[in-house]
Image (cartoon, rainbow, N blue to C red):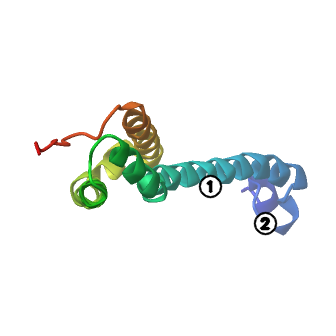
């Protein structure tokens, strides 16, 4: 019958090299998660930071400051609503696809929509009223 040291368990079987080799991938994973999480929140927060500049820019194109702020608030509110709906209905996909795939889809989606918004020449659904 095998004893504990032969099975690789017990106090005398710990190998320092194994722990060091496992620490590097763990550190890389933590750094990538931290960087990705920061990128996701940058994509969510950049609209709030840019709202005053966007309102000024829209003023140069004939949109009043009040209308610009209302439209920017509507976009921010729609984003929060979409975030909440995603939490409710898409949360189960994390169990189905796994956290890594969901995280990457969220990161690519947030970056893609941020770039699409930044490349537009005007706000979507802005209606210029005559007069």
Residue at image point 35% right, 50% down? 94
Residue at image coords 73%, 52%: 27
Which residue of the protein is positioned furthest toward the front in this rendering?
Answer: 131
Q: SS of the residue at dot 1?
A: helix
Which residue is nearer to you in this view: 108 or 124?
124
Nearest to the observer: residue 119 or residue 112: 119
* Eye-nearest disc, 2 or 1: 1
The N terminus appears in which quarter of the rendering? bottom right
**Residue positioned most to the left:** 130
Instruction: Name the residue nearer the viewer: 83 or 6.
Output: 83
User: To which quarter of the image does residue 115 belong?
Assistant: top left
The percent coordinates of residue 81 (x first, y second) are: 24, 60
- The extreme bottom residue here reads 11
For mark 1, what is the residue?
A: 34
Residue identified by numbered label 2: 10
Residue 21: mark: none
Tally of numbered discs: 2
Residue 126 located left or right of residue 36: left
Mark 2 or mark 1: name the one nearer the start of the chain: 2
Dot 2: what SS?
loop
Q: Is residue 47 above or below residue 61?
A: below
Q: At x 34% / y 48%, what residue is drawn?
A: 59
- Give the quarter of the figure containing the C terminus: top left
Question: Is disc 1 surrounded by few (<14), some (14 to 19) or many (20+) residues within 10 Å?
Answer: few
Please indicate whether residue 99 sits to the left or right of residue 93 in the image.
right
CA distance for labels 2 and 1: 35 Å
């Amino acid at each position: 019958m095998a004893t504990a040291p032969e099975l690789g368990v017990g106090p005398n079987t710990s190998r320092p090299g194994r722990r060091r080799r496992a620490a590097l991938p763990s550190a890389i994973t933590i750094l990538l998660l931290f960087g990705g999480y920061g990128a996701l929140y940058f994509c969510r927060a950049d609209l709030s930071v840019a709202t005053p500049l966007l309102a000024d820019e829209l003023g140069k194109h004939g949109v009043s400051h009040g209308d610009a702020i209302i439209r920017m608030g509507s976009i921010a509110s729609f984003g929060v609503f979409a975030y909440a709906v995603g939490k409710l209905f898409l949360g189960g996909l994390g169990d189905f696809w796994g956290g890594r795939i969901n995280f990457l889809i969220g990161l690519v989606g947030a970056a893609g929509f941020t770039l699409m918004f930044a490349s537009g020449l005007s706000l979507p659904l802005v209606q210029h009223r005559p007069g």
